[in-house]
Amino acid sequence: MKILILYFSATGNTAGIAHELRTRFTELGVTADEVDITPPAVRRDGVAIEPYDAVVFGFPVHSWRAPAVVRDWLRTLDGRQKRCSTFFTYGGFGIHPAHESTRKILTGQGFVVVSSAEFLAPHTFNLGGWKAMEGRPDTSDLEVAREYAARTLQRFAGTDQAVLGSLEATRYSDDELDAIERFRFRVVTELPSRTGRECSMCRACEEICPAEAMDAARGEADPDRCIVCLGCVAACPEQALSVNDLSASWDMKLKMEKITVAEMESKKSRIYL
């Protein structure tokens, strides 16, 4: 059996889980390949899924869903009744309806979704001062990843014929979810920029940007394109890029979500079958 792991990972969290899954699939005697669809060129050029028996899709959660550029790209695929699975990384706050939203898109494109999973990882906004899920994923999260790979392989191979049913949805419409996604810009009010800092012009920020929003020469992101993934901030080897100080909004977020740091840290990664 050949499995393709397609993942989007601006800051490396989702990539880490994808690597763990590939390792586990290989241990189980399966050929598994990884393709990083974060670069826009990869999505534009297309990814050949026909040679594979099954596909695993991995994404971060942006405001309860897979990132908008990912959702748009998924709608260009032809599933041809190929079995697939999804997994998500998130910073400890809202996760649903990411599973159900993505399942519906993939099902609409002709895939058969058999499982899903979610893994705790540092929140993107930690790059601006938040402290969500620092130190995750830990060994317990990686054990869940290994179990997820084994259980999903059973469904890919047909030893378990079950498929994934409907998961927790939402009362919000797509338009309302789009508005919630734009709320990210009310937290990150100053998009990634150099603001006068020295730069060697390695252009790593421009190369990593999944929305082609970062202009390395100007040292700032295009507000009409930026999706606030902060991949450019994470990729800068000189720490020349930054956003506004988000530390004050961290306490506000905890109060809004009615959760403590201890309660957040007690959360576990989870498999859906």
Image (cartoon, rainbow, N blue to C red):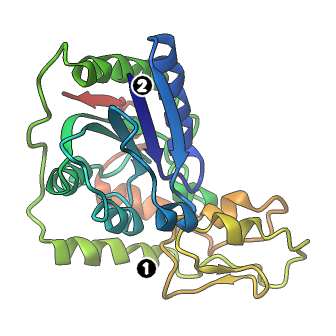
| Nearer to the camera, 102 or 255 | 102
Query: What kind of residue is marked 2?
Result: Ala
Residue 244 coordinates in the image, percent (x, y): 62, 75
Question: Dividing the picture into quarters, in which one does residue 162 lie?
Answer: top left
Q: Give the mark, 2 or 1, whose residue is nearer the N terminus.
A: 2
**246 up-or-down from 147: above or below:** below
Q: CA distance from mark 2 to mark 1?
A: 33 Å
The spot of residue 200 in percent (x, y) is 91, 71
Quadrant into which the C terminus falls: top left
- SS label for mark 2: helix
Please tell me whether residue 157 is drawn above or below residue 18 in the rendered image.
Answer: above
Q: Looking at the figure, which quarter contains the N terminus?
A: top left
Question: Which of 223/45 is in front?
Answer: 45
Give me the disc on residue 115.
Answer: none
Q: Residues within 10 Å of mark 2 (few under 14, many from 20)?
A: many
Mark 1 closeness class: few <14, some 14–19, many ≥20 residues within 10 Å: few
The residue identified by callout 1 is: 186
Residue at screen point 59% across, 65% down: 230
Q: Position of residue 23 (x, y in %)?
A: 54, 21
